[in-house]
């Protein structure tokens, strides 16, 4: 059984795949935006506020203390598995993800670029040391006994909703080596994607013969610009997303379905069925 999406993928030899939050919702990690691409909640913290204000870091880490376990324990879903299968078919140029949850790698994808970094790692802004997020979790709990008992609704990217809490009492751990500010190794809003990472992505895009967007509204410019560049270069672009995307005008094919079901034909079990 064929579909326009299957035909699009079959025609490509070197697919540039760009994924977003819609890939991870089936793994229990909430999405940022609604079907119109609007914020569902208050926008996330900015780089400037995080680096500039202790109060912002207190609030960030208090919420992260509660939100991290859900991300750290999340398991890949059928969408991740389908993209592993696509790579196994030899048709993948690269998988560029805007997600910071590492679920593509956990599923077995190899040619992955984490455009916005990785939440399972923490970076010292003083000495550039990298610390596992899990180790920082132990530091956070040691400095703030009892905080893990607070109840909070889960939010995207290891965040959690914590209202009416006095964050000024929260102890923010510093770098164990130099005392510097610890920051998740992810690109915050208001922060640029590292230049060498952008150059690597552009090199892959130059090798690609088609672009497939999976589970992203492309509202963030750092991802959208690659789709824009692909369309300008004349590459066919398909998007699989529930709801509007910023690139709707640039698409050769738009599929509004759940990612996992639309890509299920790629799974080895589907071929045998
Ligand atoms: Zn340090």
Image (cartoon, rainbow, N blue to C red):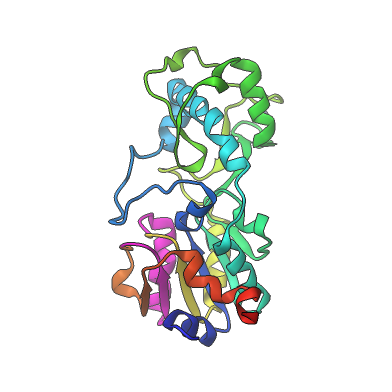
The residue lying at 61 percent from left, 15 percent from top is: 145
Residue 125: x, y in percent? 59, 33
For residue 33, say whether it is visible.
yes
Please say if 238 is above or below 125.
below
For the record, the magenta segment spans: 218-243
The residue lying at 65 percent from left, 29 percent from top is: 136
Please say if 119 is above or below 110.
above
Residue 83: x, y in percent? 59, 68
Q: Foreground: 208 or 162?
A: 162
Side (left or right) of 126 relative to 190:
right
Q: Quadrant of residue 189?
A: top left
For residue 235, say whether it is visible.
no
Side (left or right) of 221 relative to 7:
left
Residue reaching furthest to the front:
273
The residue lying at 58 percent from left, 84 percent from top is: 13
Please say if 120 is above or below 263.
above
Q: Quadrant of residue 183?
A: top right
Q: Foreground: 30 or 173?
A: 30
Please say if 241 is above or below 31.
below
Residue 194: x, y in percent? 54, 51
């Amino acid at each position: 059984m064929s579909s326009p999406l299957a035909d699009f993928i079959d025609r490509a030899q070197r697919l540039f795949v760009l994924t977003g939050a819609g890939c991870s919702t089936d793994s229990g990690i909430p999405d940022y935006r609604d079907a119109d691409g609007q914020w569902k909640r208050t926008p996330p913290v900015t780089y400037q506020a995080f680096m500039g204000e202790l109060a912002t870091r207190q609030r960030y880490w208090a919420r992260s203390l509660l939100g991290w376990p859900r991300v750290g324990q999340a398991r890949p879903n059928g969408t991740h598995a389908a993209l592993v299968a696509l790579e196994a078919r030899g048709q993948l140029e690269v998988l560029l993800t805007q997600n910071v949850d590492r679920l593509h790698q956990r599923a077995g994808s190899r040619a992955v670029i984490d455009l916005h970094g990785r939440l399972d790692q923490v970076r010292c802004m003083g000495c550039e040391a990298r610390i596992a997020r899990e180790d920082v979790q132990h530091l956070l709990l040691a400095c703030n006994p009892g905080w893990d008992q607070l109840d909070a609704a889960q939010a995207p990217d290891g965040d959690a909703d914590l209202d009416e809490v006095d964050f000024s009492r929260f102890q923010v751990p510093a770098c164990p080596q130099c005392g510097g500010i610890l920051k998740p190794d992810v690109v915050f809003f208001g922060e640029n994607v590292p230049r060498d990472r952008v150059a690597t992505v552009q090199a892959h895009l130059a090798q690609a013969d088609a672009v497939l967007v999976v589970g992203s509204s492309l509202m963030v410019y750092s991802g959208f610009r690659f789709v824009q560049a692909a369309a300008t270069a004349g590459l066919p672009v398909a998007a699989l997303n529930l709801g509007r995307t910023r690139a709707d005008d640039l698409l050769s094919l738009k599929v509004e379905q759940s990612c996992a079901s639309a890509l299920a034909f790629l799974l080895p079990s589907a071929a045998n069925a």
